[in-house]
Image: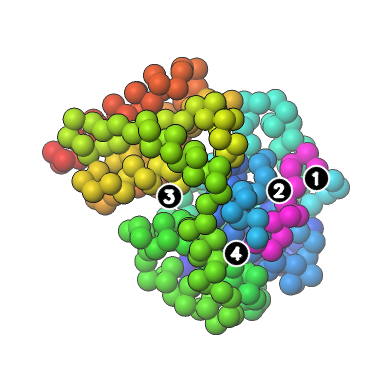
Amino acid sequence: MRNPEALREIADHLRAAQRIAVCAHLNPDGDCIGSALAVRLILTALGKEVEVFDRDKVPDNLSMLAGADAVRTLDQATGRYDTLLCVDCAELSRVVNFGIPEQKAAFDGLRERCGELLQIDHHPSNPGYGDCHVIDGNAAATCVMIYDLMGLLGVKATREIAECLYTGISTDTGNFLQDNTNEDALAVIAALQETGFDQAALGRKLFAERRPEQVALISRALNTLRYDETRSVTCMTLTLGDFEETGALPEDADTIVNFGRDIRGVHMALLARETVEGVKMSLRSVSPYEIVEVARKYGGGGHEMAAGCTVKGIPLEAAADAVFADLCIALQEQDKA
């Protein structure tokens, strides 16, 4: 059991609550959605009324998970909730963009309707903003923590719950290729297999199947690929026009940065993509190199080898050049250490 005392406290709060709002973070990924939907299924099994909220829609490749079609936007919240639970949100600002008045108002409206604020997260940078929180930086994914919570609540895993938890763990470990793939994560996967869920079919949906529009977007990104002078750092860019012209969705760009990281000899990779809110940066590295401090420099964060940030106020190419240069400096400094 990981974080037993903190998780027991969260479990006690959830047992006492009847109507619960669950918040996932903006631009949701597999661990975020998997955690939120698993919590919904677990608490529903206990007779709780649970609603899941997210600023953004569930990505197409995660829409097959049970309850994905029930995820609502924050402004659709009605009535009062005993508890607001945030999952996989390293900061409260990951729930909405508080710089946009409409989004801030939507979150504030939901928060006013809720009692206590709870949070479960595995990002080590999390400051612990909840009234009650559990943060485990050693957990491969928040879904590992949700699995433990399920046990404390006395709920048995179903195929639907297993699919949600597998999605979170497999995506946050890069399909079990990253260094955070630890014994705890693999033990949870082994236990989930007892439900009989089709791991091979789900894995294919998550990691192999691509929409034609996404393939077109990947082609656009690869056409911009460039290296530093040592061919150890890569950078790719995508414009708003690339999305419009290919018909690709924002989530279609989520794993494109890995194409730059996975080139032999590359240690760090950057994908800079233009959005209406600024230039969104996805940073990745391979062990032992870390890139999270570069993301933090620009107000972002994440994990040592998988992080992100958004640069505002400067054009795409200038923003990409700045972060790319910082990655090159970070690589040099870490090589000297």
Q: Amino acid at mark 4?
A: Cys
Give the numbered dot on residue 124.
Answer: 3
Q: Amino acid at mark 1?
A: Ala
On the image, which quarter does residue 94 sit in? top right
Dot placed on the residue nearer the N-terminal end, 4 or 1: 1
| Left or right: 311 as drawn, with respect to 33 | left
Measured Cα–Cα span from mark 1 to mark 2 = 8 Å
Assess whether mark 2 and mark 1 are in contact (beta carbons under 8 angstroms).
yes
The region drawn magenta spans 65-77
Give the numbered dot on residue 131.
Answer: none
Q: Secondary structure at mark 3?
A: loop
Assess whether mark 2 and mark 3 are in contact (beta carbons under 8 angstroms).
no
Mark 2: few/some/many CA within 10 Å (<14, 14-19, 20+): many
Mark 3: few/some/many CA within 10 Å (<14, 14-19, 20+): some
Q: Which residue is mark 4?
A: 164
Q: Select label 3 or label 1 by which is in front.
A: 1
Q: Select label 3 or label 2 by which is in front.
A: 2
Q: Which residue is mark 1?
A: 77
